[in-house]
Image (spheres, rainbow, N blue to C red):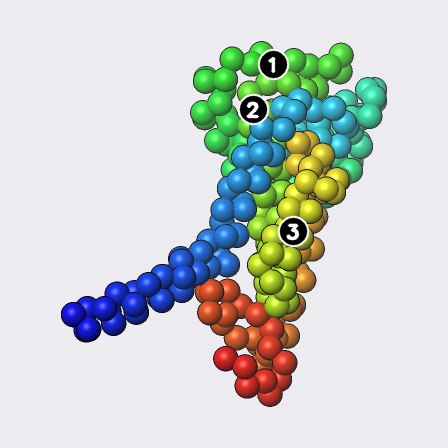
Amino acid sequence: MARSGTRATRLVGEAPRTVAVRWNDGRVALVLFVAVSLIYIALSRGVFLYGDDILMFQVTEGIVERGTFAVTSPHDGGDNARSIPGEDGQGYAKYGIGQSLVAIPMYVVSDLLLEPLLPLEDEHDPYGNQRLGPIIYGTALTNALLGGAAVALTWLLARVLAYSRQTACVLALFLAFATPLTHYAATFLSEPLTTLALLTTVYGLVRAASIATGTLRDAPTGGAGLVPTGSTKT
């Protein structure tokens, strides 16, 4: 009986640790990514309102459909979606290529799955630029995923910097719902990609510096935190 009681006491004492290991930092980041991405998807407009998003989408379309960076928006007329004429006489976007490249997977998925399933008619502006349709909606969801990834990485960055879980969660949720990221995640503009790229750079630099100086150790919860050099804390 005494042995059984000791075993029961040991199991009860180890329960919180089991739960902590189960919810390590990586799993929390995954939950944040999925949850925030789903909220951003629910907020997505599914329509292009600016010239930037139209032209960047047309670059994605050109790469996938025609193997070219040229766009279909006219350069001799139009509104804020007017292209820039190239030496070959075709029109080109004046924006960076990053957003258009990252959106290729969602464009392909939308073309294969959403086009036949989503009852949404295509709409074009007077200059022939498509602004609404299943493939527009699906491709624009790229930013919902990028925004969710940025929030998850903010959590990981805060944990690497040795912030508590509560503080890291507040920082991540603040980025998600108290900054312009909420707006941009519902568009096809490049701000979510820029945010994620900057966070990835900072996270990588912090990790590399802490590993090089020996101040990075695995936390008991499965995460990683910075520890002052020479610290004997376990």
Q: Secondary structure at mark 1?
A: loop
Residue 6 place in picture, x, y as percent? 25, 72
- Mark 3, residues whose alpha carbon is within 10 Å: few (<14), some, or many (≥20)? some
Front: mark 3 or 1: 3
**Which amino acid is tagged 3?**
Val
Q: Are marks 1 and 2 in contact (CB under 8 Å)?
A: no
Front: mark 2 or 3: 3
Q: Earlier in the sequence, mark 3 or mark 1?
A: 1
Q: Is residue 36 above or below residue 117?
A: below
Q: What residue is shown with label 3?
A: 170
Q: Earlier in the sequence, mark 2 or mark 3?
A: 2
> Residue at the location (64% across, 75% down)?
209
Residue 1 place in picture, x, y as percent? 16, 70
Is 4 in front, or is 122? 4
Q: Which mark is residue 122?
A: 1
> Residue at the location (53% across, 40% down)?
35
Q: Earlier in the sequence, mark 1 or mark 2?
A: 1
Q: Which mark is residue 30?
A: none
Q: Is residue 18 above or below residue 55?
A: below
Residue 223 place in picture, x, y as percent? 50, 65
Q: What residue is shown with label 2?
A: 135
Q: Is residue 157 found left or right of 86 in the rendered image? A: left
Q: Secondary structure at mark 3?
A: helix
What is the distance, in whole Å, between disc 2 and disc 3 at their CAs?
35 Å
Q: Is residue 153 above or below residue 219?
A: above
Q: Is residue 51 visible?
A: yes
What is the distance, in whole Å, between disc 1 and disc 2 at their CAs?
9 Å
**Which amino acid is tagged 1?**
Asp
**Which amino acid is tagged 2?**
Ile
- Mark 2, residues whose alpha carbon is within 10 Å: few (<14), some, or many (≥20)? many
